[in-house]
Image: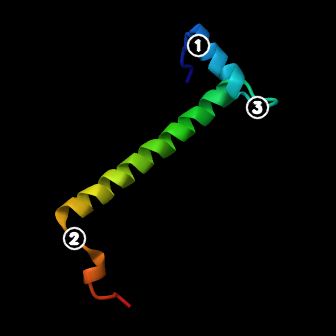
């Protein structure tokens, strides 16, 4: 699959500043997508934790399973 990307001057500066030795622009963009995926997973984890806290559930009140 090929995805077109028309980089702005700002995008080009970012790509150049974030590129590690030997990396292509595609490598930088892949790292950025991986970082975004991790950030979104962390956001979902935090949202789930916030929902548990808001519900008043407290796992410390539960008996240990072992």
Q: State the CA–CA distance, disc 2 to disc 1.
A: 46 Å
Q: Residue furthest bottom?
A: 66
Name the residue that disc number 2 marks. Answer: 57
Q: Residue at x 21, y 70 (%)?
A: 57
- Percent across and percent down for residue 17 are 70, 24
Q: Residue at x 26, y 83 (%)?
A: 62
Between residue 38 and residue 13, name the one nearer to us: 13
Q: Earlier in the sequence, mark 1 or mark 3?
A: 1
Q: Residue furthest right?
A: 22
Q: Earlier in the sequence, mark 2 or mark 1?
A: 1
Q: Earlier in the sequence, mark 2 or mark 3?
A: 3
Name the residue that disc number 3 marks. Answer: 20
Residue 5 figure quarter:
top right
Q: State the CA–CA distance, disc 1 to disc 3.
A: 18 Å
Q: State the CA–CA distance, disc 2 to disc 3.
A: 45 Å
- Percent across and percent down for residue 35 are 55, 40
Type of colouring: rainbow
* Residue contact at pointers 2 and 1, CB within 8 angstroms: no
Q: Is residue 3 above or below residue 30?
A: above
- Percent across and percent down for residue 33 are 54, 34
Name the residue that disc number 1 marks. Answer: 10
Q: Residue at x 66, y 21 (%)?
A: 15
Q: Is residue 33 above or below residue 12?
A: below
Q: Secondary structure at mark 1?
A: helix
- Percent across and percent down for residue 49 are 32, 59
Residue 29 figure quarter:
top right
């Amino acid at each position: 699959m090929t995805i077109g990307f028309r980089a702005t001057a700002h995008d080009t500066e970012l790509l150049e500043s974030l590129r590690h030795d030997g990396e292509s622009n595609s490598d930088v963009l892949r790292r950025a997508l991986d970082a975004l995926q991790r950030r979104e997973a962390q956001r979902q984890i935090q949202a789930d934790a916030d929902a548990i806290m808001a519900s008043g559930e407290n796992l410390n009140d539960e008996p240990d399973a072992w």
